[in-house]
Amino acid sequence: MAHNFFLSHFSSDKDVAEVIATVLSRISLRQLVPWFSSDNSESGGLKPGNIWFNEILVKISQSKALVTVLTPNSIHRPWIYFESGIAQALEKCEVIPVCVGVKRDTILPPLGMYQCYQLTDYKSLKEFVGKLLNKFEINFDEEMSKPVLEKALSELSKVVFTEDGSKSQPVDINQALLDIKTHFDKRFIDLLDQQTITNKQDSKPKNQKDLEDAEALFYSITINVKFPEYQGKQFLEIRADDSIQAVLNNLYLLLSDYVEPYTYMEKWILQNPHTGERMIVREVGRMVPAKVIFKQNIEWEAIKIKQEYKASSSKEIVQKN
């Protein structure tokens, strides 16, 4: 039996939607059937003669989950929030935001109030797939799924967002919501209004502590990749129990088209762009907590190096700092 879910996305993000649809279809052995408007397959997407607005309403109403794709192209597009609002108003449809090319801890309400998933982070992608399969009572076998997940990571890491989309002018989210709030379920609007009031007050120590505790569970970091053959930003999740080596392993999955296995510190390396300090770890990488090094306010750079790192390579940097 096939199950339905709705993939909400901006038209320029069709390639991202296709990767998500493919990975979920393959891992579920085609038990999950995603519907998204730009799907060109014979059985998917909008068809000639369809009244697109009515078709979208019907497809969302038939779905048990709506996956909202947030990218630099879509994050300020009111239509994404509109479709999510329709789904939230349905009793049996769950809204699940996913991020590609943006940090999930920068997503504003209303979508920022949900559990978001960073799809260019292996653990987060795995958690997203597991959650969606579990919602439809489909068994998730990570060992069997790992090659599919790794391929999806590689494909998503190479997505280049359109110039117009990435530089689009920010939209006032409150105004956008006001324009479409008549389509929202009342309990959703009440929840949003209450969250806005709480944020404005921001005076109760308990609320501040809860926020700090939530941030301590995970946060996102930015890696600026500056390879001769590829330049771009990659976003990774840092969790309380992550080691430096776990983060480097995750980063390798995203860069595997450009670097060979076991070549960190030989062919490429991470460095702090402000101090020039390089991340020199090897044998103790699994013992050092990632949160000690990967701070939220530091964007590390991944660069190629001309010769293998040696202990003497750090002498000048250590003396300087």
Image (cartoon, helix red, strand yellow):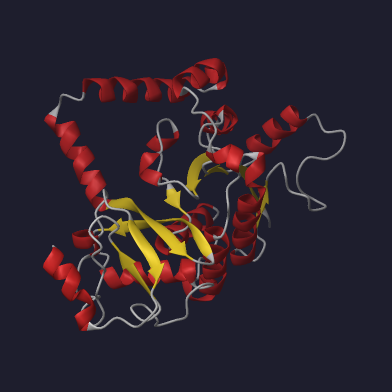
Residue at position x 60%, y 63% from top? Answer: 28
Residue at position x 40%, y 81% from top? Answer: 263
Q: Is residue 108 visible?
A: yes
Q: Indicate the quadrant containing the C terminus: top left, top right, bottom left or bottom right.
A: bottom left
Q: Quadrant of residue 115?
A: top left
Using the image, determine if residue 166 lies above or below residue 280: above
Using the image, determine if residue 274 lies above or below residue 82: below
Q: Indicate the quadrant containing the N terminus: top left, top right, bottom left or bottom right.
A: bottom right
Q: Nearer the viewer, residue 295 or 59?
A: 295
Q: How many marks?
A: 0
The image shows residue 171 at horizontal and vertical percentages of 50, 25
Residue at position x 48%, y 68% from top? Answer: 255
The image shows residue 251 at horizontal and vertical percentages of 41, 67
The image shows residue 203 at horizontal and vertical percentages of 16, 24
Side (left or right) of 71 relative to 295: right
Q: Is residue 73 visible?
A: no
Q: Nearer the viewer, residue 67 or 107?
A: 107
The image shows residue 64 at horizontal and vertical percentages of 58, 43
Q: Quadrant of residue 247?
A: bottom left
